[in-house]
């Protein structure tokens, strides 16, 4: 609690929420399509996110109609692990409730989108019957624990990471009494929220939980696929062959940024201590308790753990953690990150089985004219019943595939036009994006919907320069909040602002149709899912402008730099082209693209300022 007793609005909501219940059950019974602001905030703890179809927002306002409210539910999957039946069940939900495509998140979870309020209880109950939950996938708690997905059930180091991720998940999962009573109980709404109900215990969190959301990731030095330095708590395993020595504990990472707020920026996690395997859970509990007690609950913009570490300093923060332990906190060790695997393609496991990493553009499992990914995944799982994992890069990993099944699976993928990994260019293989428009409330610009054309244009430039196979991480986001860990990428395009321009030349329109007629089709249900960005004016062009960040480290150890700001969408490739030409001509021996771009951005930093 701040010294003056003042807390943010979100803190006040939690304090008076009746254990995260609010009046959600009552509002579920109302005819309105959405929830009040207070309940919408509480719903995040339940993994339910209230959104609006922004494609038709202006047209509906002009007509005097209410917003077209819809919901996304986020499914937890520790380390991205699911069974075949669970994935098939989620794909079935998409069909049964006519939802948007099932989407893999950059934190190894899964999202179901475009739900209506009247279907929320039915969908969440179906998710529970699959042995999954949406609870605690959002809100001011520890969200999905990230871990290398390429782990079996043996005694190897990756499997040890996976088991530890599960233990952390159990340690930091709050009491789910409110979740059960709201979504899974047969009681009436009034029975499930009666005042004499026994108050649940939230363990390490307390009644008002944490000051902000919390993220944990586990990695190996030779495979930092989870981007361990981008986490509130990162655990970097030290091992000799298959024997685990201990874990480097990193604290204070985070990708979110608000450019207009001073001292608000992405941070890399810093090494706090090195502990033995049996000490890890105690240290994590102590860190979370320190954050719960001392984190900023008055200013939402300073509420993340990274700002507590910055304000107190690493030494003082470490002492606060030490005060909660009955053994001395060891000093950190020198542990170098040496590799990063995207886990795509066929790979062998120690037990003789195979892994198959399937690329999924922007994490969206859907059937399109050029590739029917959803149907391919469904066919493979129905026939071979393999386990499945979501990777930190929003792709899928089939686990435990029998060696004699490889040819049959390749045939299924070819039948559904899913391209083999060998056909992917370096930039397409590593590209990531956030959903952005039209559903995300924070999005300023497009992101996922412009990725196909951006990738095609960038691939063309790289091909001309003979760089098609050059590793290149590209991340596109619709705002500066850092989704998809954009500030670690070689090239990041971060949405900054939009401008509506009146233009009578149809050729000036971008690739997304943006007319009132198309918005009308959307309202009448005659248009495909999410095809257009609608405007109330038939001759308005929406110009998205982006900040270009360059120079991230391929192994996730360095933040990139701002290179140019407020670049219109149709000029992005023009700005990037000279950089690629210079890389082709001036790169040092074996210099990676990210390292070269870092040098270029550093040289031009003086002429680049944020407005």
Image: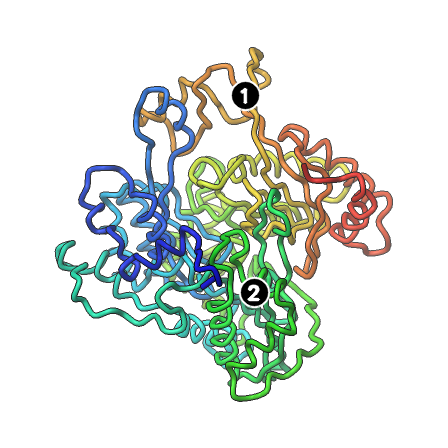
Name the element at disc 1.
strand
Q: Position of residue 176 (x, y in %)?
A: 29, 65
Please tell me in which quadrant of the rendered image residue 20 appears.
Answer: bottom left
- Pointers 2 and 1 in contact (C-beta within 8 Å): no
Left or right of 122 on screen, residue 45: right
Q: Give the residue at mark 2.
A: 347
Indicate the quadrant containing the N terminus: top left, top right, bottom left or bottom right: bottom left
Q: Gap between marks 2 and 1, in whole Å?
A: 47 Å
Q: Residue sitting at 59 percent across and 37 percent down?
A: 496
Q: In front here: 416 or 449?
A: 449
Counting labels gives 2
Name the element at disc 2.
strand
Viewer-nearest of discs 2 and 1: 1
Q: Residue sitting at 79 percent across and 36 percent down?
A: 578
Q: Residue furthest front?
A: 4
Q: Give the residue at mark 1.
A: 541
The scheme the figure's colours follow is rainbow
Give the class, few, some or many, for how many residues have Cα within 10 Å of label 2's Cα (few <14, many ≥20). Answer: some
Q: Position of residue 265 (x, y in %)?
A: 62, 52
Q: Is residue 80 visible?
A: no
Q: In front here: 498 or 507?
A: 498
Give the class, few, some or many, for how many residues have Cα within 10 Å of label 1's Cα (few <14, many ≥20). Answer: many
Q: Is residue 192 visible?
A: yes
Q: Residue sitting at 54 percent across and 25 percent down?
A: 542
Indicate the quadrant containing the C terminus: top left, top right, bottom left or bottom right: top right
Q: Residue furthest bottom?
A: 327
Q: Position of residue 432 (x, y in %)?
A: 57, 48
**Is tag 2's residue or tag 1's residue first in the polypeptide sequence?**
2
Left or right of 333 on screen, residue 9: left
Q: Residue furthest top?
A: 504
Q: Is residue 555 shown above or below 369?
A: below
């Amino acid at each position: 609690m701040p010294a003056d007793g003042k807390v943010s609005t979100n803190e006040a909501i939690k304090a008076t929420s009746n254990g995260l219940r609010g009046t959600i059950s009552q509002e579920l019974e109302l005819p309105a399509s959405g929830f009040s602001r207070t309940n919408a905030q509480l719903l995040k703890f339940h993994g339910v996110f209230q959104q609006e179809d922004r494609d038709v927002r202006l047209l509906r306002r002009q007509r005097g109609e209410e917003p077209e409210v819809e919901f996304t539910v986020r499914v937890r999957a520790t380390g991205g692990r699911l069974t075949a039946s669970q994935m098939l069940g989620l794909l079935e939900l998409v069909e049964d409730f006519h939802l948007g495509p099932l989407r893999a998140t950059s934190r190894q979870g899964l999202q179901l989108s475009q739900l209506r309020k009247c279907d929320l209880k039915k969908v969440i109950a179906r998710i529970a019957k699959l042995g999954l939950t949406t609870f605690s996938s959002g809100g001011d708690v520890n969200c999905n624990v990230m871990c290398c997905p390429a782990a079996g059930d043996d005694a190897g180091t990756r499997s040890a990471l996976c088991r530890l991720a599960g233990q952390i998940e159990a340690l930091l999962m709050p009491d789910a009494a409110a979740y059960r009573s709201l979504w899974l109980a047969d009681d009436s709404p009034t029975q499930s929220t009666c005042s004499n109900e026994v108050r649940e215990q939230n363990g390490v969190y307390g009644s008002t939980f944490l000051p902000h959301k919390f993220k944990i990731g586990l990695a190996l030095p030779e495979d930092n696929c989870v981007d361990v330095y981008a986490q509130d708590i990162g655990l970097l395993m030290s091992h000799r062959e298959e024997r685990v020595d201990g874990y480097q504990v990193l604290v204070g990472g985070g990708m979110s940024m608000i450019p207009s707020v001073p001292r608000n920026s992405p941070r890399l996690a810093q090494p706090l201590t090195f502990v033995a395997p049996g000490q890890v859970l105690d240290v994590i509990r102590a860190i979370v308790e320190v954050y719960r007690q001392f984190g900023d609950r008055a200013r939402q913009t300073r509420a993340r753990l990274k700002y507590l570490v910055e304000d107190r300093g690493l030494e003082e923060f470490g002492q606060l953690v030490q005060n909660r332990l009955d053994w001395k906190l060891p000093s950190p060790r020198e542990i170098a990150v040496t590799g990063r695997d995207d886990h795509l393609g066929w790979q062998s496991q120690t037990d003789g089985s195979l892994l198959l990493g399937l690329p999924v553009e922007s994490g969206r499992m859907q059937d399109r004219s050029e590739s029917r990914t959803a149907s391919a995944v469904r066919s493979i799982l129905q026939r071979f019943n393999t386990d499945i994992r979501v990777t930190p890069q929003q792709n899928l990993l089939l686990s435990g595939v029998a060696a004699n099944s490889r040819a049959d699976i390749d045939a299924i993928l070819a039948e559904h036009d899913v391209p083999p990994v060998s056909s992917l260019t370096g930039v397409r293989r590593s590209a990531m994006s956030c959903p952005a428009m039209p559903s995300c409330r924070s999005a300023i610009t497009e992101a996922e919907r412009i990725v196909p054309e951006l990738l095609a244009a960038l691939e063309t430039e790289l091909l001309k320069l003979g760089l098609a196979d050059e590793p290149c991480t590209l991340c596109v986001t619709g705002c500066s909040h850092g989704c998809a860990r954009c500030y670690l990428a070689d090239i990041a395009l971060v949405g900054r602002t939009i401008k509506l321009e009146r233009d009578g030349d149809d050729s000036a329109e971008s690739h997304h149709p943006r007319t009132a007629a198309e918005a009308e089709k959307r309202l009448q249900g005659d248009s495909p899912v999410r095809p257009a960005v609608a405007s109330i004016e038939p001759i308005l062009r929406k110009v998205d402008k982006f900040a270009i960040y360059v120079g991230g480290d391929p192994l996730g150890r360095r933040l990139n730099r701002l290179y140019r700001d407020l670049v219109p969408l149709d000029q992005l490739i023009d700005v990037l082209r000279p950089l690629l030409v210079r890389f082709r001509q001036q790169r040092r021996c074996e210099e990676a693209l990210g390292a070269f771009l870092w040098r270029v951005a550093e040289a031009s930093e003086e002429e680049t300022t944020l407005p």
